[in-house]
Image (tube, rainbow, N blue to C red):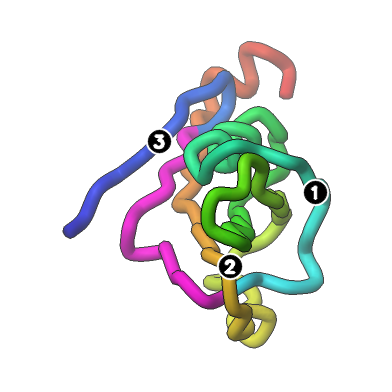
Amino acid sequence: MFYWFFFLDQCRILAFPSTLFFVGERLINHTIANISVIDRELCEYRCYLLHNCVSVNFYFGQNGAEAHNCELNNSTSKEHERDLVKAASYAYHGTNVRAIAYQCQFFGV
């Protein structure tokens, strides 16, 4: 199954394709924020809100937990393949990012 879960902001399109979703793995050495969220979708949305975020590690922990840990990363497994490591109770989700240059220039970014 292939799907695109994407967000559009002023300067980029951030897509979370299913082909870059890995259960039992985590990207290390690139975390820029650690937040508590209720689900993976909110974790991905928070990545969208942070302009230099391009992937997430989602810790789903114990069944029935109300809050989950979300690590926002400033890199992807495509850029740092060796930093994608096995990690129980984690899911890694990378993105495809496309800049929208004309809008970034318009907004002075």
Q: Is residue 24 magenta?
A: yes
| Disc number lying in front (2 or 3) | 2
CB atoms of marks 2 and 3 within 8 Å: no
Tell me the CA gap for discs 2 and 3: 21 Å
Front residue of 88 and 75: 88
Image: 65 above or below 47: below
Residue with the most extreme front position = 64
Q: Quadrant of the C terminus?
A: top right
Tell me the CA gap for discs 1 and 3: 21 Å
- Amino acid beneath label 3: Phe
Tell me the CA gap for discs 2 and 1: 14 Å
Image: 108 above or below 45: above
Tell me what residue is drawn at x 70 percent, y 51 percent: 69
Q: Quadrant of the N terminus?
A: bottom left
Position of residue 59 measured from the top left corner of the image (x, y, whole percent):
63, 60
Front residue of 66 and 83: 66
Position of residue 27 measured from the top left corner of the image (x, y, whole percent):
66, 71
Task: Report the disc number at residue 63.
Answer: none
Task: Report the disc number at residue 90.
Answer: 2
Give the residue number, with chain letter if any, for mark 1: 34
Position of residue 96 measured from the top left corner of the image (x, y, whole percent):
45, 52
CB atoms of marks 2 and 1 within 8 Å: no
Residue with the most extreme top position = 106
Q: Is residue 82 magenta?
A: no
Give the residue number, with chain letter if any, for mark 3: 6
Position of 18 with respect to 38 (left or right) is left
Tell me what residue is drawn at x 57 percent, y 19 percent: 10
Magenta stretch, main secondary structure, is strand
Q: Which residues are magenta?
A: 13-25
Between discs 2 and 1, the one toward the N terminus: 1
Query: Crowdedness of circle 2 by 10 Å Cα count: few (<14), some, many (20+)?
Result: many
Image: 68 above or below 100: below
